Amino acid sequence: MLSFIMRRLLIAIPTIFLISIFVFALQKLLPGDPVLAMAGEERDPEVLEYLREKYRLNDPIPVQYFTWVGNALRGDLGISLRTNQPVLELIGQKLPVTIQLATMAMIFALVIGIPAGILSAVKKGSVTDYVANVVALSGLSIPNFWLGIMLILLVSVKWQLLPASGYVPLSEDPIRSITVMLMPAFVLGTALAATLMRHTRSAMLGVLSSDYVRTARAKGLVERRVILKHAFRNALAPIVTLTALLFGELIAGAVLTEQIFTIPGFGKLVVDAVFNRDYAVVQGIVLVTAVGFIVMNLLADVAYVLLNPRLRKQ
């Protein structure tokens, strides 16, 4: 197991290096000058020059890149050009909000998607199967922003059951925090539930036709035990891998949902940084997100090995 993890880490290192190059290069291609945005309307030449020297924007591009990478390796992602705060501090403030939202959305997705996928596979060709597929297709087709707006109008405005927007830290009031996050988490979780349902169904259909499942049924085992212990357990590997990747996607892709429900998370920080041409913040966010994806992928690989004993000897 240790050698397996080390091999994955050795692959991750050049991957992160290439990502850092793309992040830095693409950031430089954004139109506009961040110094002009910082200077305001007066734009005194001496102030502009001072800002460029302060943030080392006059250095050659390769020097800027290696300076940024060197600082990042020491845990310094730079200073925000707009707020003058350390980028790592800004990320530390916003990331827990998005992680809470992503975790709740993933719980919705798992609770809805996996049972629906199992039921659809077991009842293949039945009305239940067709209904589950129609619901999954609807979940993939309905845009998150439309579903979010509709829920706000119905659940919050008309029925007044849940808050329409805002955020309460989990440490201040756990109940209120979870209540506020229910609707945006459900909006994000529905699309993921549809994806999980389809993958669970495919994995279960492949396993249900295998020899060991037929043997278990021939022995007279209870059908529930055959499905949950023998079939579902062996179908878990691709589901776990997909879940890990979807969770990483949630953290990076909750921008629209956070904007609709006014959640001060990672997504809003990204949008503000791009509009303000805040190079350091954008670079830091993308780098942290990329590392997060790699970590989630590594955890998925480890879980895959734990679920499949045959791979432990490789």
Image: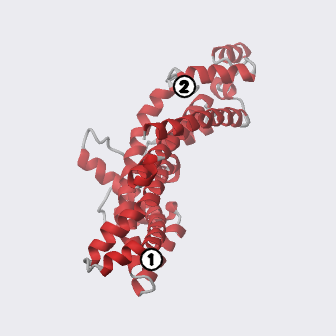
Q: Is label 1 or label 2 in front?
A: 1
Name the foreground residue: 263 vs 286: 286
Residue sitting at x 31%, y 59%: 162
From this viewpoint, is residue 34 visible?
Answer: yes
Q: Which residue is mark 1?
A: 209
Looking at the image, residue 127 sits to the left or right of residue 21; the answer is left
Q: Earlier in the sequence, mark 1 or mark 2?
A: 2
Residue sitting at x 43%, y 50%: 305
Asked whether the beta carbons under mark 1 and mark 2 sit within 8 Å of each other, the answer is no
Instruction: Determine which of the numbered discs, if any, sits on residue 142 in the image.
Output: none
Where 19 falls versus 196 (above or below)? above
Identify the amino acid type marked 2.
Leu
Q: Residues within 10 Å of mark 1 (few under 14, many from 20)?
A: few
Where 297 falls versus 205 (above or below)? above
From this viewpoint, is residue 152 visible?
Answer: no
Looking at the image, residue 125 sits to the left or right of residue 24; the answer is left
Identify the amino acid type marked 1.
Ser
Callout 1 secondary element? loop
Q: Residues within 10 Å of mark 2 (few under 14, many from 20)?
A: many
Looking at the rendered image, the quarter that the N terminus falls into is: top left
Name the foreground residue: 229 vs 52: 229
Callout 2 secondary element? loop
Residue sitting at x 33%, y 52%: 180
**x and y, in percent, of residue 303 in the image:** 41, 49
Residue sitting at x 55%, y 26%: 80
**x and y, in percent, of residue 127 in the image:** 41, 87
**x and y, in percent, of residue 188 in the image:** 45, 58
The quarter of the picture where residue 30 lies is top right
Looking at the image, residue 62 sits to the left or right of residue 93; the answer is right
How far apart marks 1 and 2 lie (CA) works out to: 52 Å
Looking at the image, residue 78 sits to the left or right of residue 173; the answer is right
Instruction: Determine which of the numbered discs, if any, sits on residue 77 in the image.
Output: 2
